[in-house]
Image: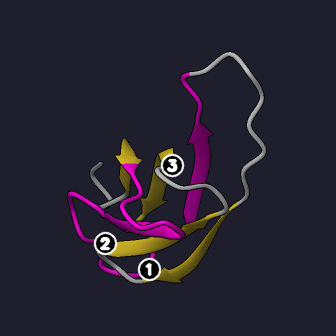
């Protein structure tokens, strides 16, 4: 955008049993203002999973999960 606003999104596999790192394709100049994470469930059955962002900087975040091999959708917005 003309004022430098950045929106990034994608689907990521969390590589560790308790979560994993997500690296943004473009680094933000400041920490992102908004990050939304949603569990991706390709099964029709319900899976109870909690997700939390436990570390955040301008180029990546660490997402913790209660399930192994979790896939997540991420959208991040900022400057």
Q: Secondary structure at mark 1?
A: loop
**Camera-side residue of 74 and 47:** 47
In terms of sequence position, does the residue under pointer 3 or pointer 1 come before the other? Answer: 1
Location of residue 73 in the rendering, given as x and y in whole percent from the top left corner: 49, 42
Query: Which of the 4 quarters of the picture holds residue 48?
Result: top right
In terms of sequence position, does the residue under pointer 3 or pointer 2 come before the other? Answer: 2
| Cα separation between marks 3 and 2 | 25 Å
> Relative to 64, does residue 58 appear above or below in the rendering?
below
The residue most toward the top is 44
Residue depicted at x 46% and y 50%:
69
Q: Secondary structure at mark 3?
A: loop
Residue 70 numbered mark, or none: 3
**Camera-side residue of 74 and 15:** 15
| Cα separation between marks 2 and 1 | 6 Å
Residue depicted at x 54% and y 23%:
42
**Camera-side residue of 3 and 48:** 48
Q: Secondary structure at mark 2?
A: loop
Residue depicted at x 74% and y 37%:
47
Residue depicted at x 21% and y 62%:
26
Q: Are marks 3 and 1 in contact (CB under 8 Å)?
A: no
Q: Select label 3 or label 2 by which is in front.
A: 3
- The span picked out in magenta is 13-42
Q: Judge whether residue 27 is colored magenta.
A: yes
Q: Select label 3 or label 1 by which is in front.
A: 3
Q: Is residue 8 visible?
A: no
Q: Judge whether residue 59 is colored magenta.
A: no
> Relative to 68, does residue 47 appear above or below in the rendering?
above
| Cα separation between marks 3 and 1 | 24 Å
Q: How many residues crowd mark 2 within 10 Å: few (<14), some (14–19), many (20+)?
A: many
Residue wearing tag 2: 28
Residue wearing tag 1: 31
Q: Is residue 40 visible?
A: yes
């Amino acid at each position: 955008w003309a004022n430098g606003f950045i929106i990034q999104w994608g689907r990521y596999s969390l590589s560790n049993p308790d979560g994993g790192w997500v690296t943004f394709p473009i680094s933000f100049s400041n920490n992102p203002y908004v990050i939304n994470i949603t569990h991706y469930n390709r099964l029709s059955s319900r899976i109870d999973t909690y997700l939390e962002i436990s570390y955040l900087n301008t180029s990546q975040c660490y997402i913790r999960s209660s399930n192994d091999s979790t896939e997540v959708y991420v959208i991040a917005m900022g400057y």
